[in-house]
Structures are given as structure tokens and as C-alpha cells.
Image (spheres, grey):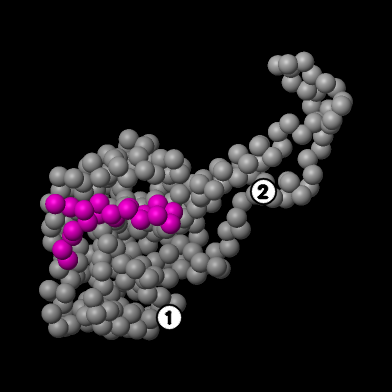
Amino acid sequence: MSAGPLVGYSSSGSEDEDEAEAEIEAATEGLTRPGAGHCRRGQSPDPSQRFPVPDSVLNMFPSTEERPEDDSAKHGGRVRTFPHERGNWATHVYLPYEAREEFLELLDLLLPHAQTYVPRLVRMEAFHLSLSQSVVLRHHWILPFVQALKDRMASFQRFFFTANRVKIYTNQEKTRTFVGLEVTSGHAECLDLVSEVDRVMEEFDLTTFYPDPSFHISLAWCVGDARPQLEGQCLQELQEILDEFEDSEMLLRVLTEQVRCKSGNKFFSLPLK
């Protein structure tokens, strides 16, 4: 079974960074040596005559060349899909899935069994169905981007989808592996949503979604490519556990009421009709 790609997540950037840079300019502007090299109105002073900026002022603001430490050990071994840069906000469009108690009970059966094959698997902290890759937005484009999404989503009706087929995925770089539930009904409606999201991506010159997506809800993940251990016998046994779980058919039938966009640490809800 081939593995479909899944986007990674990261967040970076803050509006405070641009404000800090502006404050640096304001703090350092006009600090010239008193009484030396007076200038006529409209004439710039000689740069050699500028008074040196005190260290106490310079240390108030981090250098614009500094970059945050990107230590994968602090993120469970995950590697960024793209480098952290000032002012960049990792952005992702998806359908949220609110896990009910019965869903977590099913996961409590699936995950320990999968861990007998790959012990390093860990449960996802939240559950969703991706409608976009993870892309980078500059801070000042976030609100126009979200508004464009809202305009595209305004005419969409709510719909049901079912995700009841266990499948193994990796991200494009094959640095992470996921155990997921693939969508078996509602695929056409998800494609329609992706088509509109892709149009917004194109408007902002961003990467569109995969050409033949396998829509799914990820349950667990691990670092590295664990497909050889998880596909085959393990995958078959996981599917049997799911099929035998009481009321799994109704449990995994999901009503889609909203599209959500996450940009950095900001969340935006786009209700469907």
C-alpha cells in the first residue's frame, strides 16, 4: 500500500518583531555628537560624526540576523518542513475533529497494538483532516488570506464523511510516519473544499494541495519511516480491531460544520452553511 503525504506543522513569527525593528531605528536616529559638525537644514550629517549608540540601547533589541534555535529534540524529534524565519507564520487549513469518549476508547485499543511493532509511536495531541499543505504567510497577509477563505467557503453546505480504513502515511521528507484513518465516504465533498482552498493558495502564490489526496485523520505518529514495520500484518490487525469495535461505523461518521485555519498561534473558524 502506498503512503500518502501529510503536512508537518510549525509556527513562527510575531508582529512584535517588526515593532522592535522600528523601535531600534527610533532609538538610534539623531544620536549625533553635540556641537560637532553642525549641518545646514536639509543636509545629512557626516556618518563619521555620529555619536556611538550605547550598548544598553543596542542590547534592548535582538539583532535581526539572529534566528531562534531550531532544536528538534525539543519537539519530539520533529524536523521543520521549512526553516524558521522572522515574520513567517506557518499556516494550515483543515477540518477539525472533536474526539468523543468512544473514539478515545478505540484509540486506546489501536495504539498499544501498533506500539508492539513500533514502540516509539505516540498519540496525536489533536485530530483533524487536512485541506492544505503547511505553507508560510507573512504576518500582514494573514487577515486577507483568511478573508479570502471565508469568501470561498460561504456557499458550502455541511456534510458527513466517514473515516474507517486504517492506513499508514509519511510526510514528504519521510522523516515522520503516521497511523491514520482514511476517508471512505465524503471524499468528493472534501475534494470540492480543497479546490476552493487551492484557489486561495494560488491567489497568494502559495503551494496547493497534493494532486491525488488521501484524506485522513491521523491517530499517532513517530519519527522516521516506520512503514516496513507497520504495513502488512500490523495494518491488517489494526483494521480488524477497528471493525470489531462496537458502533465503529457510526462513531467514525463525522459531521463537518466548519473549516479551520491555523496561522502561527492564531485560529480562525470558517462556518459552513
Q: Residue at x 43, y 64 (%)?
A: 176
State which tag comes first along the sequence, 1 or 2: 2
Q: Residues within 10 Å of mark 1 (few under 14, many from 20)?
A: few
Three-letter residue code for mark 2: Phe
Which type of secondary structure does the marked residue at label 1 adopt?
Answer: loop
Residue lying furthest right in this view?
A: 36
Asked if residue 266 is among those painted magenta in the image, a careful observer would answer yes
Give left or right: position of 178 versus 155.
right
Q: Is residue 29 above or below residue 105?
A: above
Give left or right: position of 162 versus 21.
left
Residue 58 placement (x, y as % from top left) = 73, 46
In this view of the protein, can residue 228 be seen by the observer? no
Start and end of the magenta stretch?
254-273
**How many dots with numbers?**
2
Q: Quadrant of the N terminus?
A: bottom left
Residue at the spot of label 1: 119
Depth check: 195 or 182 in front? Answer: 195
